[in-house]
Image (cartoon, rainbow, N blue to C red):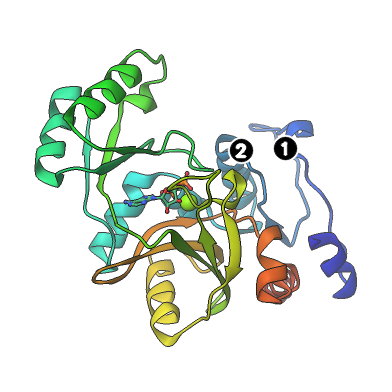
């Protein structure tokens, strides 16, 4: 879709495939790219590539700083909270003992997530202390030290759906409700069986999204929000947002909007 949109916009788009890349790190070999639109689904590879090209002088969408903040839920929650964007109350702990204290502070149910991850992998709703103990024990047995960083969050009693809004530059171009289904349970990610339907971009939604993306450099983002009893809360910002399932329900040419923005940045 992005290639088609580029063709329509009359610009050449060159694919940089992460699995085929060999980056000369210490040797100077110049790469001539005007703008790099980072689409890698691998967070680790995209961080390396974004750093690399940014340091060579390429304008990367989104920036390394943005990827760092968006890709780490602790950093995102911190920045959202610090900017006064409504966001669920969150604690981070490094041991099961401290994580249990967070359980006491938040109450149950709560939500525990890996600080780095997507597609709702290992995002768990935890209903009581026993369930928390079981989840913590499983995490302790895992080899990966990042899985032992416990990110615990207040559970938002959302109405069987949440919201994904697409921000391109300074515009909120479209939004969908992600509805949970029998298959997806309380999870709404469309990659996990949630279904998409159109969500009106109200002034309230626009305002909170534009305030949220101020925590990162201007670019192209998918903002995740939930409808809480006290209004909208932002729980994360995606820096390589997927959009395929959102075109039909919204009728918005999201790929075209993205490429239009990329072309505008190339002309700057
Ligand atoms: N605090 C919360 N309360 C209720 N549901 C949540 C909460 N946090 C996340 N969810 C749900 O979990 C799913 C994935 O959460 P998210 O934080 O966006 O992780 P990922 O980065 O894996 O997509 C979404 O369906 C979202 O609605
Ligand atoms: Mg998400």
The reply to whether residue 216 is visible in this rendering is no
Whether ligand 1 has any atom under 8 Å from the Cβ at mark 1 is answered as: no
- Residue 225 vs 261, above or below: the answer is above
Provide residue 129's location: percent of width, then percent of height: 17, 30
Q: Residue at x 67, y 50 (%)?
A: 39
Q: Is residue 201 left or right of residue 17?
A: left
Q: Secondary structure at mark 1?
A: helix
Within-10-Å neighbours for mark 1: few <14, some 14–19, many 20+: some
Of 155 and 180, nearer the camera is 180
Within-10-Å neighbours for mark 2: few <14, some 14–19, many 20+: few
Write down the residue under mark 1: 18
Q: Is residue 78 left or right of residue 66?
A: left
Callout 2 touching callout 1 (CB < 8 Å): yes
Of 197 and 216, nearer the camera is 197
Residue 214 figure quarter: bottom left
Provide residue 69's location: percent of width, then percent of height: 41, 51
- Number of numbered callouts drawn: 2
Q: Residue at x 48, y 38 (%)?
A: 117
Write down the residue under mark 2: 42
Provide residue 213's location: percent of width, then percent of height: 43, 68
Q: Residue at x 51, y 81 (%)?
A: 201
Of 197 and 10, nearer the camera is 197
Provide residue 2's location: percent of width, then percent of height: 79, 62
- Residue 211 vs 39, above or below: the answer is below
Say whether disc 2 or disc 1 marks the residue closer to the N-terminus.
1
């Amino acid at each position: 879709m992005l290639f088609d949109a580029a063709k329509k916009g009359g610009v050449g788009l060159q694919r940089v495939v992460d699995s085929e890349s060999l980056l000369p790190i210490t040797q100077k070999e110049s790469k001539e790219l005007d703008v790099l639109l980072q689409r890698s689904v691998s967070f680790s590879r995209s961080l390396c590539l974004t750093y690399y090209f940014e340091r060579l002088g390429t304008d990367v969408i989104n920036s390394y700083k943005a990827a760092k903040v968006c890709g780490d839920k602790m950093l995102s929650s911190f920045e959202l909270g610090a900017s006064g964007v409504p966001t669920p109350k969150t604690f981070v702990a490094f041991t099961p003992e401290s994580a249990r204290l967070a359980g006491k502070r938040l109450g149950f149910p709560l939500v525990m997530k890996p600080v780095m991850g997507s597609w709702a992998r290992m995002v768990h709703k935890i209903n009581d202390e026993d369930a928390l103990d079981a989840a913590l024990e499983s995490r302790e047995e895992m080899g990966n030290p990042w899985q032992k960083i416990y990110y615990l969050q207040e559970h938002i009693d959302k109405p069987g759906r949440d919201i994904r809004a697409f921000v391109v530059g300074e515009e909120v171009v479209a939004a969908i409700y992600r509805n949970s289904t029998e298959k997806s349970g309380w999870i709404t990610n469309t990659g996990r069986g949630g279904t998409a339907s159109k969500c009106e971009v109200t002034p309230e939604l626009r305002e909170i999204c534009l305030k949220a993306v101020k925590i990162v450099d201007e670019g192209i983002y998918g903002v995740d929000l939930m409808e809480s009893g006290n209004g909208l809360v932002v729980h994360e910002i995606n820096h390589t947002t997927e959009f395929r399932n959102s075109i039909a329900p919204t009728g918005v040419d999201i790929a075209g909007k993205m490429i239009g923005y990329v072309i505008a940045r190339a002309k700057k």
